[in-house]
Amino acid sequence: MFSFIVRRVLAAIPTLFIISVIVFSLQQLLPGDPALLVTGGEASAETLAQIREQFGFNDPLVVQYWHWITDVFHGDFGTSYRTREAIGPMLASKIPVTLTLATAAMIISLVIGIPAGILAAIWRGRGWDHAVTVIALSGISIPNFWLGIILILVFAVNLGWLPAGGYVSFLEDPVQCLRTIAMPAFVLGAALAGAMMRHTRSAMLTVMRQDYVRTARAKGVAEKTVILKHAFLNAQVPIITLATLQFGTLLAGAVLTEQIFSIPGIGKMVVDAVFNREYQAVQAITLLSGAAFVLMSLLADVLYFIANPKLRTKTL
């Protein structure tokens, strides 16, 4: 298994390199003079020339990229031109917030989507199947911002059960943390649960048509064992793929949801950075988002290895 993971890590390195090049190149295409951002928009020509020389804006792009990527490897993502704060510590404070929200949303997605998908496959064409399909399509189709506003009106404004926004760390107050992330986690998890249900149902229907499932039933194996052991275990690959990609998306930052519920995570940070033209911060967040997807892809490969005995046999 170790050699399998090493090969996957080595294969991910070129992908990360390409992502870093694209992220750096896109920043260079942004309009405006970065020296003006440093000065706040007002400076003489001599001052601008000094700033360009000081920050290396006059260097060739290859040299600028090398300095930037070297600093990234050392954990230095640059400094905010507006506040003069280091971007690395700012990101470090936002990641636990988004990670908590993403984990809660992922749990909601799995708890709702997988059982519903299994039951829809078992009762294909019946009332439960149609009901679950309608609910899943509704969850996928309803915009996050609209559902978030409705939940705030119902549970925060009218009933007063939950806070309308804000965030409290789980380490500081676990109960209050769950209360603050309950609505945004449900908003994100509802859409993901719909997609998870559809993928689980499709994967289960495909597996349940296989000969080994019919053979297990012909031998008199209990239906519960057939569904959970023979069918579901062999339908995990597409479910793992979707779950890891969804989690990668959540880690990249739920922009609208965090903005609506005033959650100080990565999504809200990138919105504030765009409005304030903090291109250094946007660049750092984009790079980390790409790295998160690569990491989730690597995790999916490892989970495939664990879940699929045939893959383990071929690797050995």
Image (tube, grey):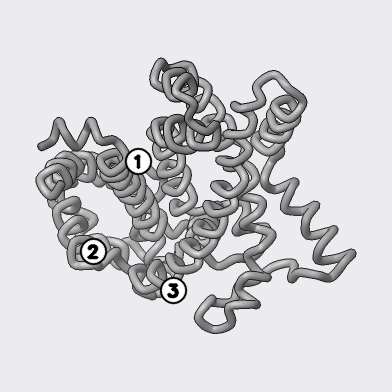
Callout 1: helix, strand or loop? loop
User: What's under tag 2, amino acid-wise?
Assistant: Phe
Residue at the front extreme, as displayed:
220
Find residue 249 and report its horizontal and vertical position in percent. Answer: 46, 46
| Nearer to the camera, 306 or 38 | 306
Find residue 58 and report its horizontal and vertical position in percent. Answer: 20, 53
How far is mark 2 from mark 1, CA to CA? Answer: 18 Å
Circle 3 packing at 10 Å, graded few (<14), some (14-19), many (20+), is few
Q: Which residue is mark 1?
A: 29
Residue 308's quadrant in the figure? Answer: top left
| Nearer to the camera, 57 or 299 | 299
Q: Report if residue 23 is visible in the image.
A: no
Q: Name the residue at 66% across, 63% down.
A: 182
Of mark 3 and mark 1, the one earlier in the sequence is 1
Callout 2: helix, strand or loop? helix
Quadrant placement of the C terminus: top left
Find residue 38 and report its horizontal and vertical position in percent. Answer: 37, 66
Of mark 2 and mark 3, the one earlier in the sequence is 2
In the image: residue 84, left or right of residue 59: right
How far is mark 3 from mark 1, CA to CA? Answer: 23 Å
